[in-house]
Image: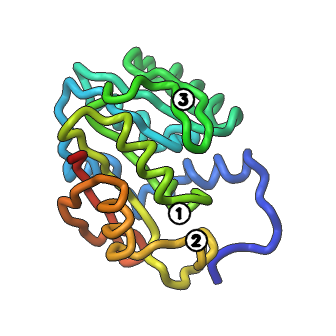
Amino acid sequence: MTSSSEPMSTQEFIRRLLSPERAGNFDPLQIFSRCPINSHDTVADIGCGPGYFTLPLAKTLINGRVLALDLDDEMLDACRERVSGARLGNVETLKCSEFEFPVRAGSIDGAFLAFVIQASPDKGRFLKAVRELLQPKGWCSVLEWYRKETEMGPPLERRIDPVDLEVMAREAGFRTMGWRDLNGDHYMMTLRNT
């Protein structure tokens, strides 16, 4: 079964996103070691939620900067609180809309998208909007769900398999740099702005 029929509150969802069990599936430092990150990059964590990946990303970017973007005010508040508690001065939290980001076009080195493409009502348009933010040859690392039944996660019809994501990414103007399995349920793909 992929999801519960009862809607989850934002606070419950935040608790689930920050749960210790999640760390068993997603070790941020291991994931970032597979991204083409330089310590001085400016990286947008698009769909940052409560900052599960934002904080370790900020620690990885010791001479760089993280733009933590989300649609949801409660998620951004939770992220800000965690960033403040960790005393990280290189993170800026910003509210965005589905396809518009408060970031100058061509101004960032990289983008990190953890499980956000599957949630977009127009995945191709979303990828094009992300690509516009990147400098030439900028990178985009994507974490997504395989299109298969799992105990938890988004509905099956929203999930996207790696081969389909590669096609969408090329249509959006990206070059795919390959993908790898993370844990049997999730995968990671790296894209490059052409």
Q: Please, is residue 168 above or below residue 42 in the view?
A: below
Q: Residue at x 18, y 44 (%)?
A: 36
Q: Position of residue 140 (x, y in %)?
A: 30, 47
- Residue 158: mark: 2
Q: How far apart in space, not on screen, are marks 1 and 2 (Cα)?
A: 5 Å
Q: Is residue 123 left or right of residue 97?
A: left
Q: Are marks 1 and 2 in contact (CB under 8 Å)?
A: yes
Q: How far apart in space, not on screen, are marks 3 and 1 (Cα)?
A: 25 Å
- Picture quarter with the N terminus: bottom right
- Residue 82: mark: 3
Q: Position of residue 193 (x, y in %)?
A: 24, 46
Residue 152: quadrant of the picture: bottom right
Seen from the viewer's position, the closer of residues 26 and 142 is 142
Q: How far apart in space, not on screen, are marks 3 and 2 (Cα)?
A: 29 Å
Q: Which residue is mark 1?
A: 118
Sequence-first disc among 3 and 2: 3
Seen from the viewer's position, the closer of residues 137 and 23 is 137
Q: Residue at x 32, y 25 (%)?
A: 107
Sequence-first disc among 1 and 2: 1
Q: Please, is residue 167 above or below residue 136 in the view?
A: below
Tag in front: 3 or 1: 1
Q: Please, is residue 171 above or below residue 11 in the view?
A: below
Residue type at tag 2: Arg
Mark 2 Cα-neighbour bin, 10 Å: few <14, some 14–19, many ≥20 = some
Q: Are marks 3 and 1 in contact (CB under 8 Å)?
A: no
Mark 3 Cα-neighbour bin, 10 Å: few <14, some 14–19, many ≥20 = some
Sequence-first disc among 3 and 1: 3
Residue type at tag 1: Gln
Mark 1 Cα-neighbour bin, 10 Å: few <14, some 14–19, many ≥20 = many
